[in-house]
């Protein structure tokens, strides 16, 4: 089944693909010309265009083609798109922390929210986002040629593929706007070799939204889409996320527009999965597309091997000292990497009666007093076991049939229906008549919790319970006015264990040093 699901979008071809723009990222990424354009000029068969599309999708989960890296990093596995995004969205918040046991340069600055423009994680993230945009643009420039080659692609399919690439491009623009607030804006219409215009996010936002709105109309519904490719519901989800944060990005709220986009999703997808924990296990592909995972990034331990994605949040987050019994339960062989661990604020907001409490606590302390070696027993910080290697049919691996030593089969849940429900609740808080409270209650009910009043504080806490470690927390805290300042502090915020306020300019990341000459710098840095 897994082999078939990957082949359905030709992801298997990515591992040997030599068709893409393999770009060494630096400030030159702002130039739209691929470093190896000749690799893209001799597509002579329709199948090769599908392989090219596979590379566009593969940019979200793979470090590069031919086993290499598309961006210049000291560790290619760390340069994976999903891993870079997760670090920027989670490590600076009340949900996750990486201790000194890893001692990777720059991670402590993310942990403490004390980063500077020289932080290499910021440079690598901006490089990955801009590279993905360039790959999408190059695909859009070339795809019309698929109509006149051997084994041609139909005009209808070419139109759909264009809409998919535009949606994937909009996703990366969303991440640039959210994290950095400024970036290069370039489309397939820009002449290769030109330097694109630098735009603040308030300028970029309407362009991205308008292009996405048009592209969404050309996407097939999830029921008619190939597994792993972007559906219309996924496009509306991205549009809803943009509207959700519109006031942060532009100063103008767009709550009604957010609710409308969410309601478009509910026309065809309105039922949560019955069991929360199965959404993050090795067989979660059954929920991708027409199920609760509206947009899933395919991951497979044979065909899309990646040190990012759910491998990073599975093996990467498992304590190195776990015993054989726990290894079996998680579906792994060998030891974990001892990376991301749980901040106490996250563990404290989720009760043990909540079905979403997926933490291992035996022998671990619910604090971060010791941020050095993370050992069992006695380590500081609980272990997150949300992302497991086992399958739904044998979740606790009683048969022992799953025993993987590195790469996870669980797809990355980029956007889920539960988030749609919680967005509608937030829209209701801002005056939209959209039945948001009932959707809020449904999310809690699945977790085995009673209804509570729909307030801003309750909703922010519920988003933590439901969406923790899925790459949304920093944006949520900023939108609710809790990220900077001292109205809400968490352990090690600002660089001290008790936590302290941080400056408001840190609602945006610093523009990396390598990009300042072109993009300028955000205020405060």
Image: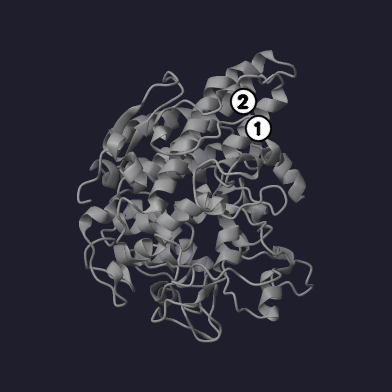
Checking the image for residue 39, the label placed there is 2
State whether residue 296 is above or below residue 333.
above
Q: Whole-percent x and y of residue 20?
A: 59, 31
Residue beneath label 1, please?
A: 18
Tell me the quarter of the picture where residue 393 sits.
bottom right
- Mark drawn on residue 514: none
Q: Could one spot residue 233 in this view of the protein?
A: yes
The front one of 323 and 441 is: 323
Instruction: Answer with left or right where residue 220 lies relative to residue 494.
Output: right
Position of 354 compared to 398: left or right?
left
- Among all residues in the image, which is located at the extreme front? 74
Residue 292 visible in rendering: no
Residue 507 vs 163, above or below: the answer is: below
Q: Residues within 10 Å of mark 1 (few under 14, many from 20)?
A: some
- In this picture, is 514 found above or below 163? below
In three-dimensional space, the C-alpha distance between marks 2 and 1, rounded to whole angstroms, equals 7 Å
- Foreground: 253 or 135? 135
Q: Residues within 10 Å of mark 2 (few under 14, many from 20)?
A: some
**Left or right: where does residue 156 sit relative to residue 444?**
right
Q: How many marks?
A: 2
**Rendered residue at 62%/40% (across/down):** 65
- Locate residue 182, reporting x and y percent: 31, 39
Q: x, y percentage for residue 374?
A: 50, 78
Q: Secondary structure under badge 1?
A: loop
């Amino acid at each position: 089944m897994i082999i078939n699901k990957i082949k359905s979008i030709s992801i298997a071809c990515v591992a040997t693909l030599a068709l893409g723009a393999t770009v060494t990222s630096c400030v030159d990424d702002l130039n739209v010309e691929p470093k190896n354009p000749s690799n893209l000029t001799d597509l002579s068969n329709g199948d090769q265009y599908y392989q090219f599309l596979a590379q566009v999708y593969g940019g979200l989960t793979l470090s590069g083609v031919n086993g290499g890296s598309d961006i210049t990093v000291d560790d290619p596995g760390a340069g994976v798109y999903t891993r870079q995004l997760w670090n920027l969205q989670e490590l600076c918040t009340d949900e996750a922390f990486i201790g000194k046991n890893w001692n990777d340069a720059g991670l402590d600055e993310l942990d403490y929210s004390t980063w500077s423009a020289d932080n290499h994680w910021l440079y690598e993230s901006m490089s990955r986002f801009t590279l993905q945009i360039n790959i999408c643009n190059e695909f859009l420039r070339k795809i019309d040629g698929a109509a006149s080659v051997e084994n041609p692609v139909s005009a209808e399919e070419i139109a759909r593929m264009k809409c998919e690439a535009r949606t994937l491009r909009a996703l990366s623009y969303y991440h640039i706007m959210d994290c950095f607030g400024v970036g290069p804006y370039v489309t397939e219409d820009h002449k290769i070799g030109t330097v694109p215009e630098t735009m603040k996010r308030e300028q970029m936002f309407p362009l991205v939204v308008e292009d996405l709105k048009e592209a969404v109309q050309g996407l097939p519904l999830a029921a008619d889409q190939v597994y792993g490719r972007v559906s219309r519901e996924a496009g509306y989800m991205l549009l809803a996320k943009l509207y959700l944060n519109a006031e942060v990005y532009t100063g103008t709220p767009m709550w009604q527009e957010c609710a409308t986009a969410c309601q478009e999703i509910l026309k065809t997808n309105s039922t949560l999965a019955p069991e929360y924990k199965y959404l993050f296990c090795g067989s979660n592909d059954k929920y991708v597309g027409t199920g609760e995972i509206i947009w899933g990034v395919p991951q497979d331990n044979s065909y899309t091997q990646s040190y990012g994605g759910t491998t990073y949040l599975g093996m990467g987050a498992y304590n190195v000292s776990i015993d054989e019994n726990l290894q079996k339960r998680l579906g792994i062989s060998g030891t974990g990497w001892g990376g991301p661990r749980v901040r106490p604020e996250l563990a404290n907001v989720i009760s043990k009666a909540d079905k979403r409490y997926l933490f291992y606590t035996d022998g671990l302390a619910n604090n971060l007093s010791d941020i050095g070696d993370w050992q069992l027993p006695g380590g500081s910080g609980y272990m997150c076991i949300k992302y497991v290697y086992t399958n739904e049919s044998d979740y606790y691996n009683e048969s022992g049939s799953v025993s993987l030593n590195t790469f996870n089969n669980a797809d990355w849940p980029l956007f889920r229906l539960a988030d749609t429900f919680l967005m509608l609740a937030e829209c209701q808080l801002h005056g939209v008549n959209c039945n948001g409270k009932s959707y809020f209650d449904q999310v809690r009910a699945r977790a085995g919790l009673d209804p509570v009043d729909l307030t801003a504080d309750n909703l922010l806490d519920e988003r933590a319970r439901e969406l923790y470690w899925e790459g949304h927390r920093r944006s949520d805290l900023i939108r609710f006015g809790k990220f900077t300042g001292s109205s809400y502090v968490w352990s090690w915020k600002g660089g001290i264990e008790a936590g302290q306020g941080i400056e408001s300019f840190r609602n945006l990341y610093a523009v990396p040093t390598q990009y300042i000459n072109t993009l300028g710098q955000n205020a405060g840095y």
